[in-house]
Image (tube, rainbow, N blue to C red):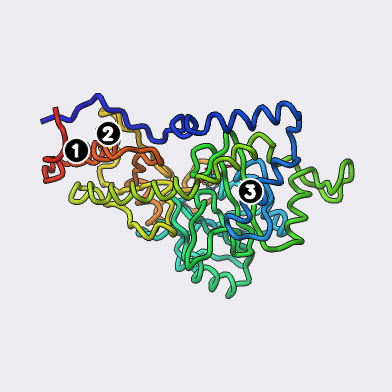
Amino acid sequence: MKLKTSMRVPFVDLQAQHRSLQSQLQAAFNEILESAHFIGGSKVREFEEAFAEFVGASYCIGVSSGTSALELSLKALGLGSGDDVIVPANSFFATAEAVSNVGARPIFADVDAHTFHIDVASCERVITPHTRAIIPVHLFGWALDMAPIEHFAAKHNLFIVEDAAQAHGIGRDGKRVGSSGRLTCFSFYPGKNLGALGDAGAITTGDACLADLLRELRDHGSPSKYQHRVVGTNARLDSLQAAALSIKLSHLNDWNEARHRHAQAYTTALKDSGVLSPTVPSAGEHNFHLFVVRSEKRDELREHLSKLGIETGIHYPTPLHLTEAYQSLGAPVKGTLPQAETLAEEILSLPMFPELTSEQIDYTAEAIHEFHGIRDQHRASMSCA
Ligand SMILES: Cc1ncc(COP(=O)(O)O)c(C=O)c1O
């Protein structure tokens, strides 16, 4: 018995999201076109205020990307040449790249195989006398348990800069990621749970002085036109992106809840399917930006799914320390961060987006059962050709 191959399951479906918002988006674009106010102005201020309120932060500084959010945050803290910053080995490249781009050195720590989050015990092993900060990543949309990281940072007198690029709208103990008062960096890359229509990002903080400095740093170090108090850069959030983000922000909670329901449905459908499903914590704690399973035959499974029209991703195929860029900069060699290295070989991100249908989830799960040659009750309920 073979699965139907007529169904297509995209990894994300931004067109579906934008279809329902098209008239609102177009009205906002027309307004900006009329005003010709493309940089800064009310659209950016409105989004910054709305996002600060949404996460529960005192200040939000809109910037041009998640990468610039990280870079400007490190710069605002005065980090640079001669400083080391601990980052998890399983993250998007930008987490480490931002450290390098301010002239500091990323120190790679291993991750926990269950949560995929940075492992504090590994941080204790890799810390150097020059370490001044740590960048924990709320990876895949699961809010980190910050207590052990805070303890580690306090013990070693380190700054914490949170990488919340994937962590929109989640938190722990009633506190949303972004509300800690620390510098917290968000990405609004289009595929994120809150995505712009191009590149965009933001930093939230509770520190008025850092907020002022970050506003200057994103705009050529300029408190007002043609005054340059410090050397900054051009990393501004533009009005079109801010307007789109404000429209989308009002849907974020619903979208996150839908993703969480899909994660629960996947977990049920993938029972005894031969892959290891991720833990599904409460809806407020995990936004399932990515639904990542583990399989020892990951590459063959991926190919099987691809043949059946199911798109998947790998986040991330190479641990940061083993990337060509960092190997050439003398990062630790293969074998030094075993959990991150094993995960990189086994993890597979299944299709996940709010508009995913139960048919698409069942079809994907059934294809995984089929790959492992497993027939179960779930299969019996599927419509197979
Ligand atoms: C964990 C993480 N950090 C940083 C970034 C960088 O964000 P951006 O692509 O907006 O520069 C991303 C984006 O993919 C990310 O997933």
Compared to residue 56, the image places residue 95 above or below, namely above
* For residue 98, above or below residue 120: above
Secondary element at tag 2: helix
In the image, farthest residue toward the bottom: 155
At mark 3, the secondary structure is strand
Instruction: Depth check: give the residue in front, 57 or 343.
Output: 57
Q: Nearer the viewer, mark 1 or mark 3?
A: 3
Q: Earlier in the sequence, mark 2 or mark 1?
A: 2
SS of the residue under disc 1: helix
Residue for badge 2? 305
- Kindly identify the amino acid type of the residue bearing the numbered disc 3: Ala
- Judge the density around disc 1: few (<14), some (14-19), many (≥20) Cα neighbours within 10 Å: some
Q: Are marks 2 and 1 in contact (CB under 8 Å)?
A: yes
Residue drawn at point x = 53 percent, y = 37 percent:
190
Count all numbered tags in the image, as a single digit: 3
- Between marks 1 and 3, how big is the CA–CA gap? 41 Å
Residue wearing tag 1: 371
Residue 82 vs residue 341: left or right?
right
